[in-house]
Image (cartoon, grey):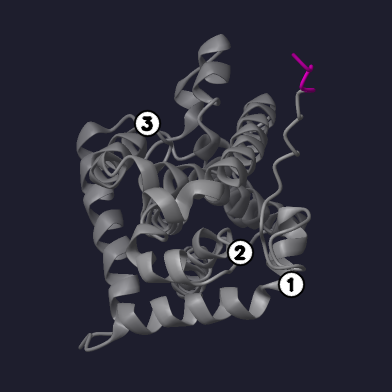
C-alpha cells in the first residue's frame, strides 16, 4: 500500500469586506463613522416619534427622581452629600446612571432587533452597539444643561477640576461600551439576556452610589465596592462637576474594572461575531 501523506488544513480565514472589519476596533469605528451616525440618528428619530412632550421626558425623569430621593433622604437623615446640596448631588448621579442604563439596554438588543441587517448585509457588527452610545448622548447633553441650571441656583461653581469632566465622559463611554459589547453578543446566542437586563440594571442601580456616596464604605470594603465600575464613574463626575471629594484609590479600582470589561468585551465580540448570521 502506498503511503498517503496527510494534508494539513488551511488556516481559517474570515471572509470580510476589506477596510471595514479588519484592524483594531477603534479604526473600524472611525472608518464606519457615517454608518454609526446613521444608526444613531435612526434610533433617535424612533425614540421621539409621535412623543407629545418630546425632550421634556428627558428632564421629567431626573427631576422626579431627585424629588423622591430628597424626600427619602430627609426622612432618613443620615446620608451625606459630601458638602454639596443634596438635590444637586443626586442629580449628577441620576444623569450619569440614566445615560448608562439606557445605552446598555439599547445595545443589548442592537443585533437581535436588526436580524435582516445582520444576516443579509456585510457591515462591521461592532457599529450596532456603538451607535447605541450616541443617541442617549443627546439626552445626556440636555440633562447636563439641567445640571448647570441647578448649579447656578445653588451657587455651586466648579474650579479647575471641571477639566476632569472630559475624563469622566470618556470613562462613562468606555464602561458603557464594554458592557454593551458583552450583552449584545451574548443576546444573539442566549435570548434570556434581553429579559434579564432590566432586573439586573435595577439591582445594579441600588448597588451604585447614585443616591448615596461611596464614602459610606471604608477601608477594604470601599475598595471591594469600587470593583463596580459605575462607582468610580459617578464619583468622578461629582468631583469634576461639583467639587465633591476626590474618589482616591476607589477610582483606580473602578477604572481597572472598566478597562477589563472593555478589553474582554472587544475580545468576546470579535470571536462571537463570526457566527452571528448563523445563530441569530
Q: Which residue is mark 3?
A: 207
Q: Residues within 10 Å of mark 3 (few under 14, many from 20)?
A: some
Q: Position of residue 212 (x, y in %)?
A: 40, 36
Q: Nearer the viewer, mark 3 or mark 1?
A: 1
Q: Which residue is mark 2?
A: 124
Q: Position of residue 61 (x, y in %)?
A: 28, 64
Circle number at residue 249: none
Q: Which residue is mark 1?
A: 31
Say if mark 1 contacts mark 2, CB within 8 Å.
yes
N-terminal of the two: label 3 or label 1?
1
Quick one: SS at disc 2? loop
Q: Residues within 10 Å of mark 1 (few under 14, many from 20)?
A: some
Q: How far apart are the alpha carbons under marks 3 and 1? A: 37 Å
Q: Position of residue 106 (x, y in %)?
A: 38, 60
Residue at 68% over, 65% down: 29
N-terminal of the two: label 2 or label 3?
2
N-terminal of the two: label 1 or label 2?
1
Residue at 27% over, 70% down: 60
**Foreground pick, 219 / 127:** 127
**Foreground pick, 39 / 142:** 39
182 in magenta: no
Q: Nearer the viewer, mark 1 or mark 2?
A: 2
- The residue range painted magenta reads 1-5
Looking at the image, residue 258 lies above or below residue 274: above
Q: Quadrant of residue 206?
A: top left
The quarter of the image holding the N terminus is top right
Q: How far apart are the alpha carbons under marks 1 and 2? A: 10 Å
Residue at 64% over, 48% down: 171
Amino acid at each position: 500500500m502506498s503511503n498517503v501523506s496527510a494534508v494539513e488544513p488551511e488556516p481559517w480565514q474570515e471572509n470580510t469586506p476589506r477596510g471595514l472589519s479588519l484592524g483594531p476596533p477603534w479604526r473600524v469605528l472611525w472608518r464606519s463613522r457615517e454608518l454609526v451616525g446613521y444608526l444613531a440618528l435612526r434610533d433617535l428619530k424612533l425614540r421621539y416619534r409621535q412623543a407629545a412632550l418630546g425632550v421634556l421626558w428627558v428632564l421629567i425623569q431626573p427631576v422626579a427622581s431627585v424629588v423622591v430621593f430628597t424626600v427619602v433622604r430627609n426622612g432618613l437623615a443620615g446620608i451625606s452629600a459630601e458638602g454639596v446640596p443634596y438635590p444637586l448631588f443626586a442629580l449628577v448621579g441620576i444623569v450619569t446612571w440614566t445615560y448608562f442604563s439606557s445605552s446598555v439596554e439599547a445595545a443589548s438588543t442592537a443585533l437581535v432587533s436588526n436580524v435582516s441587517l445582520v444576516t443579509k448585509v456585510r457591515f462591521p457588527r461592532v457599529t450596532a452597539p456603538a451607535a447605541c452610545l450616541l443617541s442617549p448622548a443627546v439626552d445626556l447633553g440636555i440633562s447636563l444643561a439641567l445640571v448647570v441650571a441647578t448649579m447656578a441656583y445653588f451657587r455651586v461653581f466648579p474650579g479647575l477640576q471641571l477639566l476632569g469632566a472630559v475624563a469622566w465622559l470618556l470613562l462613562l463611554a468606555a464602561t458603557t461600551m464594554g458592557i454593551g459589547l458583552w450583552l449584545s453578543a451574548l443576546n444573539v446566542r442566549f435570548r434570556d439576556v434581553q429579559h434579564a437586563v432590566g432586573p439586573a440594571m435595577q439591582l445594579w442601580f441600588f448597588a451604585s452610589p447614585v443616591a448615596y456616596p461611596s464614602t459610606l464604605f471604608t477601608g477594604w470594603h470601599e475598595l471591594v465596592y469600587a470593583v463596580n465600575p459605575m462607582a468610580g464613574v459617578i464619583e468622578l463626575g461629582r468631583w469634576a462637576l461639583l467639587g465633591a471629594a476626590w474618589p482616591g484609590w476607589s477610582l483606580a479600582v473602578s477604572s481597572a474594572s472598566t478597562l477589563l470589561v472593555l478589553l474582554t468585551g472587544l475580545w468576546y465580540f470579535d470571536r462571537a461575531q463570526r457566527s452571528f448570521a448563523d445563530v441569530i
